[in-house]
Amino acid sequence: MFVWLDYLMQVLVTQVFGLDIESRLGSSIHFFFYDTIKIIILLGVMIFTISYIRSYFPPERTKKILTRFGGIKGNIMASLLGIVTPFCSCSSVPLFIGFVEAGIPLGVTLSFLITSPIVNEAAFAVLLGTFGVKIAVIYVLAGVVLGVLGGVLIGKMKMESEIESYVFEISMGEAEIQQLTQKERINFALGNVRDIVKRIWLFLLIGIGLGAAIHGYAPEVLLARYAGPDNPLAVFVATVLAIPLYSNALGTIPIAEALINKGVGIGTALAFMMATTALSAPEMILLRKVIKPKLIATFVVVTGIGIVLVGYLFNFLLPVAG
């Protein structure tokens, strides 16, 4: 897909910088510029496309849809809606309150909260361009399955008492669902592209920079020893290390790409990315405003176990990149 870009970046490295493309520095510089331009292109196209679709699913409509489904159908629908209505950690609290206030079961709400941050348009765009359709699609399916199973399991635990009491007393009211014109939907999508790029560009450059350093300088033997497919604990370690980190999903994808290119299992790298996105410390701190520590701990454990299992499944199904 980006053969032309790879060629241009090779010319940049060899002709402009005067470096050997096979050298550590040359390889790192090529990785940095190639991934930066590639990701920007993918982001622009995919964020616009998915944002246009999202214009049909405002939070009010999402709540109305979810209230129509009961049992596991509700969990499945919540996870599917989580794909087209992704949220950042800053919006987790109002969404949670809105869903609870609307009478949506706790397990269904958590299905949405698990899938939505994991499966977002930006991450899908970069995975598609970096690893291809197969891994991108499996990643989406894994996020949906995690959301459904995690929500069902927590729902069966009957932990409604672990929601802060004031949440049930809040009345958010019924907001009117606005009907947008085509021009307004396009403007919404363009605005979302600008907003998301503005919010994530620093995370993106940091992630690409780290990925470039790993790509050019990280010793393969060390990575293979501690995070390679031969280490049975690699996925578990990657997931645990990711939980306390604060990083945008996009910032972790270039790191995952570089690690995979060095021989780290695909499942290990993607488990790290999923855990950073779904179980980040800032999101847990924000959720503490509406749910008690016991439920937060259950949410982290259930989701974490799911991510570990998905990581091992990836390593089993796709032991070699590409």
Image (cartoon, rainbow, N blue to C red):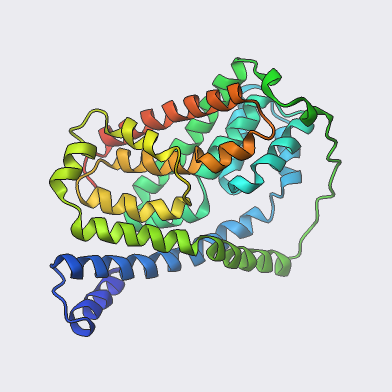
Q: Is residue 140 left or right of residue 220?
A: right
Q: Is residue 260 left or right of residue 253?
A: left
Count of marks placed on residues: 0
Q: Position of residue 122 (x, y in %)?
A: 49, 56
Residue 39 showing in the rendered view: yes
Residue 86 showing in the rendered view: no
Q: Position of residue 199 (x, y in %)?
A: 55, 61
Q: Is residue 226 left or right of residue 36?
A: left
Residue occupying image coordinates x 29% and y 42%: 266
Residue 67 in which image quadrant? top right
Residue 78 in which image quadrant? top right
Residue occupying image coordinates x 66% and y 29%: 291
Q: Position of residue 240 (x, y in %)?
A: 38, 33
Residue 66 in which image quadrant? top right
Residue occupying image coordinates x 58% and y 28%: 296
Quick one: which residue is furthest to the bottom in this view? 16
48 vs 68, nearest the viewer: 48
Quick one: which residue is furthest to the top in this view? 157
125 vs 218, nearest the viewer: 218
Residue occupying image coordinates x 44% and y 67%: 40
Q: Position of residue 284 (x, y in %)?
A: 57, 36
Relative to 69, say whether 198 is above or below: below
Relative to 88, say whether 225 is above or below: above
Q: Quadrant of the N terminus?
A: bottom left
